[in-house]
Image (cartoon, grey):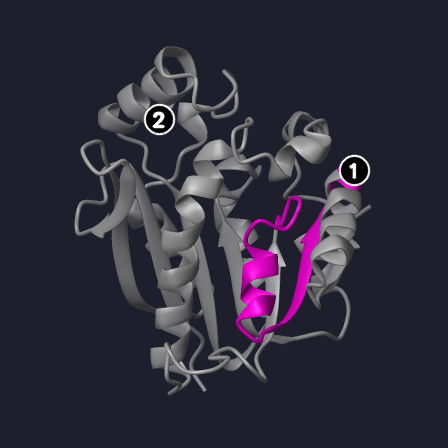
Amino acid sequence: MNAQSIIAEEVARFDALGDAWWDENGPMAPLHQLSPLRIGWARDVAARHFHREAEAGLPLAGLKILDVGCGAGLFAEPLARLGGDVLGIDPAPASIGVARRHAEETGANLAYRVATVEELAAGPDTFDVVTAMEVVEHVADPARFVAVAASLLRPGGLFLASTLNRTLRSFALAIVGAEYVLRWIEPGTHRWEQFVTPEELTLAARRAGLRGIERKGVSYDPLRRAWRLTDDLGVNYQLAAKKPG
């Protein structure tokens, strides 16, 4: 298997979640809470880039979309409901099995495949949009991962990613706070040394031939108990970049 981006223990950890992926009160609860914001951001960025109306009809209709590291489909399935022609890939077979069953249960129209980004890049497929949400902090070589993902974009295509910044604040909030104090996610889910700074991710995108569109921070508002987009990139952030053409 051509799987240079894979860290086996990371794959095994997420593969073991099984049906808990779709439990809104389970170990993936933070992703469920983040989902409306992430989907809304991706929809709006793609609508602007491809000159669509974000709030009208199916704004992603006609766009071929690849969701890398899709897990059980928490991000891929909503993209399909917005009209996208979506393929979700993940190296974890059990997660893909859960994704397929959930799509059948909900009637979502999309495809899933057990594969790495390298394996897909070895074939002929290209995409209008490639997404990697909460993925780059779990791969062996983020810069190489971005380069391979970018190679799957068609000219004029869009790369979207979300991840965690490597700061003392992210260590305090995303690891100590979220994993050990609040128990939002299972302890050990993240490794701070694998977090990727916005500068590192932007440089990786630039070296992969992409041009930046925007970077937005994501912060939790405890008063409203909701996530919001901000200009503060200190903990969670999202990046959009385009392939010239």
Residue drawn at x 45%, y 87% is 245
Q: Give the range drawn in magenta.
A: 69-94
Residue 214, position as x, y percentages in the image: 27, 64
139 or 170: which is nearer to us?
170
Residue drawn at x 26%, y 29% is 167
Residue 154, position as x, y percentages in the image: 56, 79
Is residue 87 one of those drawn in magenta? yes
Question: Measured along the vertical axis of the image, is residue 106 above or below residue 91?
Answer: below
Q: How far apart are marks 1 and 2 (CA)?
A: 26 Å
Please identify the quarter of the rendering in which residue 181 is found.
top left
Which of marks 2 and 1 precedes in the sequence?
1
Crowdedness near tag 1: few (<14), some (14–19) or many (≥20) residues, C-alpha within 10 Å? many
Please identify the quarter of the rendering in which residue 225 is found.
top left
Residue 31, position as x, y percentages in the image: 47, 40
The answer, for residue 152, to whether it is visible in the render is no
Residue where numbered disc 2 is placed = 174
Residue where numbered disc 1 is placed = 94
